[in-house]
Amino acid sequence: MLRRILFASSILALCTLAGRAVARDRDDRKWVATWTTAPQNVFKGVGATQTAALVNFAFPPATGGPQAVNQTLRMIVKPDIWGSTLRVRLSNTWGTGPITFGRVTVGLQSFSGATVAGTNRQVAFGGTASVTLAAGEERFSDALHADWARGGDDEEDISPALEGRNLAISMYIPGSSGPMTFHSTALQESFLGAPNSGDHSGDDADKFFPYETSSWFFVDAVDVMAPSDTRVLVGAGSSSVDGSITTPGNNDRFLNWMSRRLHEAYGQHVSVVNEGIGGDTAAAPTQPGQIRPLLQVLPERFSRDILGVSGVTDVLFYAGTNDFGDHIPSSQSIASLQSMVGILHRLGIKAVGSTLITNVGQGGTSAATYTAHNDINQYILQSGVFDSLADFYNKTRDPSNPDFLTTVLQPQYATHSDPTGTPDFLHLGRAGAEAEGDTLDVGFFAPRPTSSARDEGD
């Protein structure tokens, strides 16, 4: 079953690539992803807390679950690199029916739900303001020229004032959305108009967005036009990729730390994007007794979420930490990793293997768990399958204890970036994420001319 899934993903990707012309303008440029997230499920509401109320008031229960009705959603995302020509991708991946977006705009966030005056620009889809996505469909907008992003006359001259800033993507839904495709753990607050409050996609003021959410709805990618030698590193895997237990709103996941190092070395010529989902597994649960944690796990969503990233040249895997707990043996996890890396190599994409941190002390684990993780780590370190390595395990464990059955995380890395700081021996806070980021071989990412897996046109 796993081989059939991966083979189908590979064939789909190869056929898609064969049918696409490489998108370059006369200056030899291409579309590259600057922000992504993985469509995870449909939103089903959240628990009854004060914070949850800020979401649930915006999406009151309706037939089939919470949905948006005649209102505007303003999603806040942080581009990894900037460009003055960009496009956004909307997703109805998990919707059960069509959804119409009456107007979509992109602007520069000022604060909370506010945008900087004069930066909101309307995006079009096939030349029209409105777009309807069928159930399961995703679609890119037309190219948008954001003149405010430029720092000069040259296309590549980006304003230095944009460093660290966020985009605000506003989507007006004139009717009822139906079940809403979303990504749960954004670690970034976005802002929501009230139900039946109408179209505020072009308004700058925060007052039109009284509710907030820590999830992303409907949007799953932003691309910019960039030089053709730009590398795009995609993070693939579970909650540690997603950023769980790092600091909300502060971009200190291990991928963010890697991005900062790469930008220091190569400027805007490397983009780092995130396709992690909490609970993900390296292998699909295809055998009796194995637990399915998500609608789709990594090998099942590989074609859409990894190969589907614009301009992808490199993929970093942090996957397998949940498998044994879902009754997936290490041999199955390793076979799946090997198959996915094989697909990448056939497409000319490089694979980076990152070892799993020790989870000795995590509730519900045992020597068998640690042995399974060690099997995966030894495969990553010794198989020679990966093009580059990031050894999280040896960077963050107790250096005085080499025994994988008993070694624990160094205390400064085990501490979480949350109000209590209580370690769970599965996730690292920002100090640990920074340490993980330091393991990346920056020299491996020196930009090189390449044909990427998703250089696509408008």
Image (spheres, grey):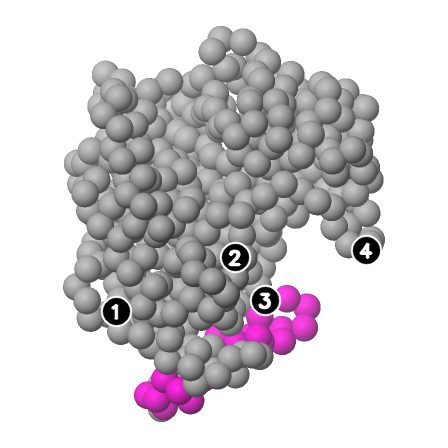
Residue 163, percent across and down? 46, 41
Dot 3, how many residues are within 10 Å of its Cα: few (below 14), some (14-19), or many (20+)?
many
The kind of secondary structure element at disc 1 is: helix
Q: Is residue 65 left or right of residue 327?
A: right
Dot 4, how many residues are within 10 Å of its Cα: few (below 14), some (14-19), or many (20+)?
few
| Residue at 52% in and 62% down | 291
Q: Is residue 413 magenta?
A: yes
Query: Amino acid type of disc 2?
Result: Arg
- In the picture, the disc for residue 49 is 4
| Residue at 26% in and 63% down | 389
Tell me which segment is drawn in magenta: 401-425
- In the picture, the disc for residue 292 is 2
Residue 158, percent across and down? 39, 31
Q: Is residue 399 depicted above or below 69 in this figure?
A: below
Please indicate, yes or no, whether residue 390 appears anywhere in the rendered image: no
Q: Quadrant of the C terminus?
A: top left
Ranked by sequence position, the earlier of labels 4 and 2 is 4
| Marks 3/1: CA–CA distance | 31 Å
Q: Which residue is mark 3?
A: 417
| Marks 2/3: CA–CA distance | 28 Å
Residue 192, percent across and down? 72, 35
| Marks 4/2: CA–CA distance | 28 Å
Q: Predominant secondary structure in magenta? A: loop
